[in-house]
Image (cartoon, rainbow, N blue to C red):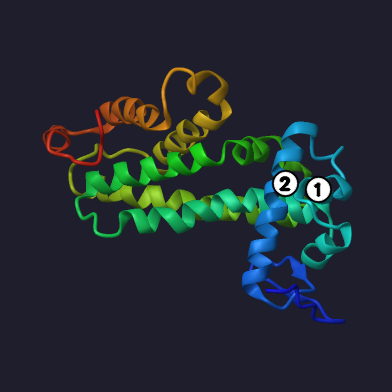
């Protein structure tokens, strides 16, 4: 499929980044290619010292082609940070499909969240380093999307409380603990990856987190869970 240019007008993709290309599938594929190169370079050299020329060379494309899909370097940073959040939103509901029991749903959501981080270590670390480099309106978009993705886990926590499996915890605070635990794999992969894989990391983390909140009924249910690993 060729890069068909829509001229002179630009179009807006769902993420509000302008493109001169009028093919959604091609936009998605090219931006994925450019984002992967940008994440590598931003991680290696830093966002501010990386240039569009650097990204073009790493992605093996021309500078002109990049400007058909994004307007500037900040677009690439925004795409990189949004990519991980979008993965949570896409993959957690799919993983929960067909899982009915509240405790199993909770463990499945946490495990899926951690798996996304395990596959996106560089992008997750980049989010901690460079979200501040986005202009205010984009920082706010990232924050809002984070709230939406956290709700996928928070809903599972509430269901466990309502089912009598968890104590009446502060749902937002407990969800925040889970998110920070998940990010910990990416932030400290240099240490943890030499000791365990992400699945064992999740098993150990679930064991510690569930110990804080399970009721007697929840402990009984945990013994029969097929989704909570060694918790």
Q: Secondary structure at mark 1?
A: helix
Report whether 57 appears left or right of 201: right
Q: Secondary structure at mark 2?
A: helix
Q: Please report whichever mark, 2 or 1, sits nearer to the chain's N-terminal start.
A: 2
Count residues near mark 2 (Cα–Cα under 10 Å), then give few for <14, some for 14-19, many for 20+.
many
The residue that mark 2 highlights is: 37
Work out whether residue 38 or residue 71 is closer to the camera in this orientation and state it: 38
* Displayed quadrant of residue 46: top right
Residue 157 visible (yes or no): no
Query: Residue drawn at (57%, 21%), measured in percent from left and top?
Result: 190
Proximity of marks 2 and 1: CB atoms separated by less than 8 Å: yes
Identify whether 166 is placed above or below 105: above
Where is residue 218 drawn, in percent x and y? 17, 37
Residue 38: x, y in percent?
Answer: 74, 46
Q: Which residue is mark 1?
A: 55
Residue 152, disc: none
């Amino acid at each position: 499929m060729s890069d068909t240019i829509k001229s002179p007008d630009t179009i807006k993709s769902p993420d509000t980044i302008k493109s001169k290309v009028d093919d959604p599938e091609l936009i998605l594929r090219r931006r994925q290619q450019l984002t992967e190169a940008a994440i590598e370079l931003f991680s290696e050299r830093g966002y501010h010292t990386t240039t569009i020329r650097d990204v073009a060379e790493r992605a093996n494309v021309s500078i002109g082609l990049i400007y058909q899909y994004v307007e500037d370097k900040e677009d690439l940073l925004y795409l990189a940070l949004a990519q991980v959040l979008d993965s949570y939103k896409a993959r957690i509901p799919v993983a929960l499909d067909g899982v009915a029991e509240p405790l199993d749903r909770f463990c499945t959501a946490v495990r899926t969240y951690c798996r996304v981080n395990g596959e996106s270590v560089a992008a997750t670390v980049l989010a901690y380093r460079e979200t501040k480099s986005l202009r205010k309106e984009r920082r706010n978009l990232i924050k809002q999307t984070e709230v939406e993705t956290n709700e996928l886990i928070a809903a599972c926590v509430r269901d466990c409380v309502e089912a009598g499996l968890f104590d009446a915890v502060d749902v937002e605070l407990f969800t925040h603990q889970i998110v920070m635990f998940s990010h910990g794999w990416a932030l400290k992969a240099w240490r943890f990856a030499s000791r365990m894989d992400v699945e064992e990391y999740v098993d150990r983390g679930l064991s510690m987190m569930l110990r804080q909140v399970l009721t007697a009924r929840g402990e009984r249910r945990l013994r029969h869970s097929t989704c909570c690993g060694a918790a």
